[in-house]
Amino acid sequence: MPNYIYKARNINGTVVTGTIEAESQRSVILRLKQQHLMVISAEEEKLNPFIESLNKMSFSILNRVGLKDLVLFSRQLSTLINAGIPIVQCLNVLIDQVENKNFKNIIMNIREDIEKGVSITMAMSKHPNVFNQLYTSMVKSGESGGVLDEVLERISSYLEAVQALQRKVRAAMAYPAVVSVVAGGIVIFLLTFVIPAFKGVFDSFGAELPLPTQILINISDILRTYLPYLILLGVIVFIILRLIVTKTEKGRITFDGLCLKLPVFGALFRKISVSRFARTLGTLVRSGVSILEALEIVAKTSGNKIVELAVMGARSAIREGERITDPLRECGVFPPMVIQMVSVGEETGALDNMLMKVADYYDREVDMTVSALASLIEPLLIVVLGVVVGTIVICMYLPIFMMSSIISR
């Protein structure tokens, strides 16, 4: 809960200040009135942006509700509702089965709100970290149309597809990340432990070392002396760059644009963006969400600022009576095939079917791209690691190869 800084006047007329933890400003006022204080002001305490970012990060890690939990919850709730069981009773059954304590508490809060007469959509929307706008919008359309079980089933299928896509991305990134970390560890080990042992031997020669060897020894000395500071500097730079990318629109546009233009991974990121766009929009349209609301949700959940701007442009065009395809074509993110299929779906009234076909096609494309990247990156990383380690070894043995000329000086 947030902290509120308050200023109040007690029964003696003295002004007192302090901080209090509460759910809302109204709660603060009520609690201070119970203490016979007349509230002058009560404002939420604003944290330093850096500290606030760290707090949010730690909160999300400790209270994370994974896609697996959400998929299971949605599918089980759909089955129970389809069986004709009242929603409160359905939630009672699910509370006993959920293992995630944080998720269990959230479901209990939703049940309590529903018992008070709140709609399930409003109850879920109070927990945006778990039930995002996409989820609650689909639930709202299912609730108003009396087909909540069908919509929940669609949500489950959609989340499973998203989960599968995330696994493919992790699979593409895991191998190069592990090999890069191992390679970096080997290089640091050689520079900090092995090369200093050779340095003592070279110093005993009392002669000038070859330039490559001298450069390597200088790098080793710098690394051994300043390694903790370099690590700290790297962490600070990473955090600052992360804040710039996540907190500024210009930073996000630049970063996301670079991701789409990367020489090896750019094509993969583009296909992932197209697949996510098509599946999300198709699922929302099929669930009865209006096209304007669906496009707004797709933009916010796209995960790429370039795609978000393109989708919002399409939304503005539709609101003004234009077609959806023109702004999508102009942004340069979506391939011509996608534009054509969206155009056909728009003209025939089968936009959701066309979008789902696009999503399925690009899911297969992501599979093939991941496989191709794995087969390409594996030998490439091995070659790079071999070149780096080989260069270090050659530099260290170069004085030994030239020992006769060094001793003769």
Image: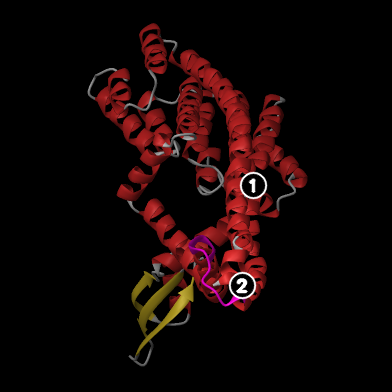
Please tell me which residue is depicted at 53% across the width and 32% down the height of the picture.
139
Say if residue 291 shows up in the picture. Answer: yes
For the record, the magenta segment spans: 205-213
Amino acid type of the residue that numbered disc 1 sits on in the rendered structure: Val
Measured along the vertical axis of the image, is residue 39 above or below residue 316? below
The tally of labels here is 2
Q: Which mark is residue 215?
A: none
Quarter of the image that includes the C terminus = bottom right
Q: Which disc number belongs to residue 202?
A: 2
Q: Earlier in the sequence, mark 2 or mark 1?
A: 1
Residue 180 sits inside the magenta stretch = no
Q: Nearer the viewer, mark 2 or mark 1?
A: 2
Q: Position of residue 136 (x, y in %)?
A: 50, 37
Residue position for label 1: 179
| Rendered image quadrant of residue 297 | top left
**Pointer 2 local density, CA inside 10 Å: few below 14, some 14–19, many at least 20:** some
Q: Is residue 260 left or right of residue 183?
A: left
Q: Position of residue 289 (x, y in %)?
A: 44, 26
Residue pictured at 40% horizontal, 82% vertical: 37
Q: Amino acid at mark 2?
A: Phe
